Amino acid sequence: MGAEPLPGRVVALQANYCLVSLDGPCEPGGDGAESWRDGCLLCTRRTRLDKSGLQVCVGDRVTVAAVDWRARRGAVVGLEPRHSLLERPAVANVSRVVVVVAVAEPGLDPLQLTRFLITAEATGQPVEVVLSKADLLPAAEVRAWCRRLEGWGYRTVAVSTRSGEGLAALRHQLAMPGIAVLCGPSGVGKSSLLNALAPALELRVAAVSGRLRRGRHTTRHVELFPVAPGALVADSPGFNTPALPADPQTLAAAFPELLARLRVAPCRFANCRHQGDPGCAVGDGWDRQAIYGRCLEEVEAAAAARSRGGQGRQGERGLRQRGDRLEPLLDPQLRRSSRSTRRQGLEQDLPELEGDLSSPDREDSDPDPR
Ligand SMILES: Nc1nc2c(ncn2[C@@H]2O[C@H](COP(=O)(O)OP(=O)(O)OP(=O)(O)O)[C@@H](O)[C@H]2O)c(=O)[nH]1
Ligand SMILES: [Mg+2]
Ligand SMILES: [Zn+2]
């Protein structure tokens, strides 16, 4: 006690605690997930840290004080700036995002894959695709998928934990220093892949179910595991419908094949929708044009709804109904939120902290299943 705070990394969040791996040599996947967790410190987050508005996320670099070595407890007292952030699943300081989709069971939906890729692109880090369950489709069809996704601009590797195909290439990719996140729909085999690469981890997996062969939300929280010296991989809970960005420019920036065409020549109009507009440099007939169009419509509809919402408040002439009386509507910044609203806000900001290892958090329960 009283010693210099020790640097480390948050590897999982559990209720109001976080699991921190202190800096130093860590054994890559050596003795399994349990012993890797046992080597970490279960840390509280000091209120001072909370009051500063900073929220700890898996992947964050932190400092830990008040260490009780026997109980393997401590307190997070400092949070270092992040160099990148994947919003969902929430992981800080990611070095690459690996979007995993199955070629079958559940079937590959190019729109859903695109939504995962858009979230991944927002990190500004390299994005790769893993086509899992390659054993479930004829090799020629798997190759066709790979070529298609490479045409979108993504390095793609087909893998199967059943046949072993592609596992050596994936191991090589994940062994690069930094944090790689495996994300994608439930049931595509993310945890199975980690088990195949590091069998000692013994992560929980479960068979897909139902007519659509969907996953069962088996993984309940994000957790980092060492797979090679300096290399951590995050397993994450699958979900179905990643959110889209708020504005069309950010959306366009998430389509590498569109950006590649714009680099050759710009469109005539700065606000070009790239949907057959006059003077569009992107042109027609690109593979994801229709998918881009659907995403764009959704982004535009959400923006229009937001601006209508603003007008709506003005239309109420500054009054709102409260029970059976009208009261003045305050500027949202001045309004004091009710206790329950404040709590909801906290839950939204800290989805992981509300769950624990035994109860599902927001990450795994999809609000609008498809
Ligand atoms: N045919 C086939 N099945 C696989 C393969 N890899 C995993 N599976 C099966 O797919 C099912 C789902 O695997 P999980 O690893 O639990 O999937 P997940 O992506 O981690 O799912 P969540 O944790 O729910 O997000 C299990 O029954 C696995 O045995 C594969 O390469 N081929
Ligand atoms: Mg899983
Ligand atoms: Zn254009």
Image: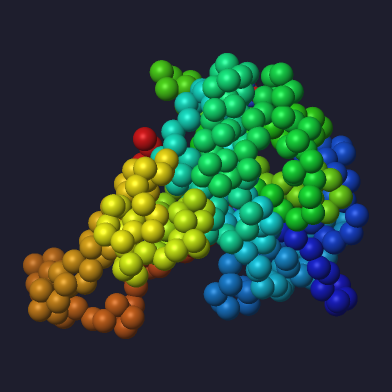
Q: Is residue 68 above or below residue 188?
A: below
Residue 256 percent location from the top left of the image: 51, 53
Residue 355 percent location from the top left of the image: 55, 49
Residue drawn at the location 61% of the way across and 19% of the way down: 139
Q: Is residue 171 above or below residue 47?
A: above
Residue 176 in sight here: yes
Q: Quadrant of ligand 1?
A: top right
Q: Is residue 14 above or below residue 279?
A: above
Residue drawn at the location 37% of the way across and 64% of the way down: 267
Q: How many numbered badges does the structure rendering display?
A: 0
Please state if 144 lies on the left or on the right of 370 as rendered.
Answer: right
Please state if 78 lies on the left or on the right of 309 as rendered.
Answer: right
In the depicted view, which residue is nearer to us: 272 or 43?
A: 272
In the depicted view, which residue is nearer to us: 37 or 191?
A: 191
Residue 86 percent location from the top left of the image: 57, 57
In the depicted view, which residue is nearer to us: 48 or 26?
A: 26
Please state if 45 lies on the left or on the right of 38 as rendered.
Answer: left
Q: Residue 322 is drawn in which quadrant?
A: bottom left
Residue 114 percent location from the top left of the image: 46, 44
Q: Residue 368 is drawn in which quadrant?
A: top left
Q: Which colouring convention does the figure follow?
A: rainbow
